[in-house]
Amino acid sequence: MSQLNYLEKLLDGVEVEWKALGEVCDFKNGFAFKSSLFKEAGLPIIRITNVDGKNISLDDVKYFDPSDYKENTASYEISKGDILIAMSGATTGKIGFYAHESPAYLNQRVGKFLPKPKILNNRYLYHYLLSKVEQIYVIAGGGAQPNLSSNALMAKIEIPIPCPDNPEKSLAVQAEIVRVLDAFTAMTAELTAELTAELNLRKKQYNYYRDQLLGFEDGEVEWKTLGDLAENLDSKRKPITSGLREAGDIPYYGASGIVDYVKDYIFDGDYLLVSEDGANLLARNTPIAFSISGKTWVNNHAHVLKFETYAERKYVEYYLNSIDLTPYISGAAQPKLNKKNLGSIKIPNPAPKEKERIVAILDKFDSLACSIKEGLPREIELRQKQYEYYRELLLSFPKSEEAA
C-alpha cells in the first residue's frame, strides 16, 4: 500500500471535533528573569531567541541563580518533551520542542503548552502548532511589534480532535498521525544532514579548486590593477530613498544584493557589483562581488564595473571573492572600500583563453555548490516541503458547517 493510500485509509470515516486550545490544553507563561542578574553559569534560561521554529537551541543561553530571587522559580522549569512558543519580537509564534535531557527555565515572553494527557497527544499538538505559526503571528497583531496574549492564543486557535466520543481511539489515531509525521521529520533531518554534509564537501572542493586555479606564483603571469581591467561606472549610480521609490519589477541593488524593486532603470546589460561599504566587507558572510544582468538600478553602496567579456567579469568576480581585502578597506566602525582603493587592487591577468578555462570550471562548481535552484540546497528545501505536504494532509480535517 502506498504512503498516500495508507494515510487516506487512516483518516477514512474518522469523526473530528474542533476545540479551542484552552479546552484541551493548559498554558504556562514565563518568569521575568532580570537581565542584570544573568550569570555565566548556573541554571539555564530559555528566551525567545532560543526558540528556532522547530526546536529549542541552547546557543547563547543565559543563566541565573535562584538565590537572587524572592519568588519560587521552580514552577518555571522546562523538561524534555515540553513545547514552547515565542510570545513577542521577530520570533513571535515560532514553536520549539525541548529535546534536551537537562532541565531549563522559562523566561518572560516564552510560553509552555501543557496538553491534557487524556485528550491530547503532546507531539500531535507540536506538529499541529507548526502549521499555525502564521495564524498565531496575526493573532499577535503582526507588524513590527507583535505581542501575543496567551488568552487570545488559547481561545482563537482551534485543534482537530479525532474520535472525540472515544478518548482511547482518539489518542490512538493521534499517536498514529504522530508516528507518520515523526518518521517524515526523522527522514527529513537525516537527509538534510547528509545533503548538508555533501554541500559542505562540495563547497570545500570548490574553494580548493578556486584557490588552485587563481593562485598564481610571482612572475607566472602579468598582474594588473582592477582599474586597468574594468571601466568604473560609479558616476551613473543614483540612490533613491525608500519613500520615493516607485514600485515595479526592476531590481534595485545595494551593497549585498537586491534591496527593492522599482519601476525604472539606469543600467541595462551585464555588470559586476562590488560592495562599497558595510560590515560584510570584513565579515564576508555573503559575496562582496556579484554579477547583475538586464535592466537594473544600483544605489551608491555598490561599485559598478563593466568588462568587455563574460570571462573577464566572472574571473574578477571569483578572484575578488577569494582574497582578503582588508588592506584596501578603511574605517573600523563603518568599513568602506572606496573607489580609489578598489581600482588599486592587483589582479593576476592570464591570457584570455586561460581565463575562459578557469571560469568554465568554477561556474560548474558554483552552480552545484551555491545555486539554490540547481544545487543541493534545493534538495533540502524539497524535503521540508514534503513533510509539510503530509502534515497538511493529516491535520487539515474539514470543519463542519456548525464548527465553521
Image (spheres, helix red, strand yellow):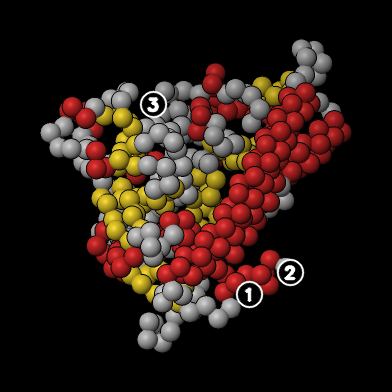
Q: Residue furthest left?
A: 70
Q: Residue 333 carries which label?
A: 3
Q: Residue furthest bottom?
A: 401
Q: Distance between the residues labelled 2 and 3?
A: 62 Å
Q: Distance between the residues labelled 1 and 2?
A: 10 Å
| Residue 297 to residue 154: above or below | above
Rendering coords of residue 88 (x, y %): 30, 51
Numbered disc 1: secondary structure: helix
Q: Are marks 1 and 2 in contact (CB under 8 Å)?
A: yes
Three-letter code, disc 1: Lys
Marks 2, 3: nearer the viewer: 2
Mark 1 is surrounded, within 10 Å at the Cα level, by few (under 14), some (14 to 19) or many (20 or more) other residues, namely few
Determine the residue positioned at 54% across, 34% down: 285
Three-letter code, disc 2: Met
| Quadrant into which the C terminus falls | bottom left
Q: Which mark is residue 1?
A: 2
Q: Are marks 1 and 3 in contact (CB under 8 Å)?
A: no
Q: Which residue lies furthest to the top in this view?
A: 218
| Residue 388 to residue 293: above or below | below
**Circle 1 sits on which residue?**
9
Viewer-closest of 330 and 118: 118
